[in-house]
Image (spheres, grey):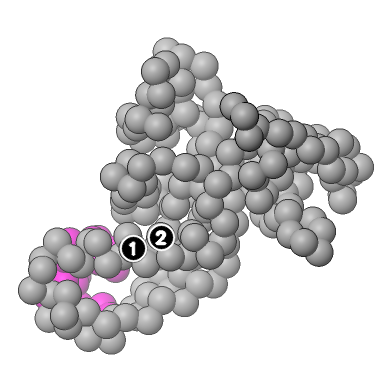
Amino acid sequence: MADFRLETVKCKNCGSGLVVEVNDNIVYCSSCGSGFEILQEGLIPIEINFAAPAIRSEGEMIYKPFWLLKTTLTILERKASGAFLKNLFGGSGESTSGNITFYIPAFYCSLDTLRNIATQYTLKNPVASPQKYNVSLKGFDYGKQDAMKLSEFLLISFEAEKSDVMKNFRYDLIFNSMEILGIPFYNLGNGRFKDAVLGTEIQI
Ligand SMILES: [Zn+2]
């Protein structure tokens, strides 16, 4: 806990005092629902919404931040399609372009954990109607640039399941918008968390 420090800033929308962990690059105002990126030039507005819990479990509920990246993917060249893209492009496997919403954890976790939960959420896209909640949202370790790189990592890791495909996989990924989604988790103790939308257990 040696490097754990807090700062306060004022919400640019409603003036409420906001407590920020020093490493966080995003802050959410639970008073008015505004979100801000914390940049050198000040607080820059960013959309922050939340997923509603869908399953019950034991343990205290907390919200963890994900980047929601709305993208358009165009496949320029590939020999065969992995199941990932077939699912995302509507099942036919014929399409070469489509929209994908990537869900990338903004909080620190192992690469295996990140890949597991990002995959499930990106494939199932289970949060159709995010909403505002009066809750705390903290632990923003990965910024926009990280989230974009991790989206590409996810995309490539799916195609790489068929290793013969890799050398022929060329794509164009356009990031249309980026926002934050708070996903509810149950704290099961000992670093274990279970998300309240899909029921995925992760170890942090
Ligand atoms: Zn506010």
In the picture as drawn, the residue positioned furthest to the front comes out as 2
Percent x, y of residue 68: 51, 55
Task: Report which residue position mark 2 lands on.
Answer: 150
Horizontal arrangement in the rendering, residue 66 relative to residue 12 (left or right): left
Q: Residue at x 53, y 22 (%)?
A: 61
Q: Do the residues under discs 2 and 1 have CB atoms within 8 angstroms?
A: yes
Horizontal arrangement in the rendering, residue 133 relative to residue 16 (left or right): left
Residue 31 found in image quarter: top right
Can the viewer see residue 77? yes
Vertical comparison of 144 with 7: above or below: below
Which span of residues is magenta-colored? 80-96
Q: Residue at x 58, y 39 (%)?
A: 139
In the picture as drawn, the residue positioned furthest to the top comes out as 58
In depth, the one of 52 and 169 nearer the eye is 169
Q: Residue at x 41, y 76 (%)?
A: 173
In depth, the one of 101 and 163 nearer the eye is 163
Magenta span: predominant SS is loop
Q: CA distance from mark 2 to mark 1?
A: 5 Å
Secondary structure at numbered mark 2: helix
Percent x, y of residue 129: 54, 47
Give amino acid for label 1.
Answer: Phe
In depth, the one of 142 and 63 nearer the eye is 142
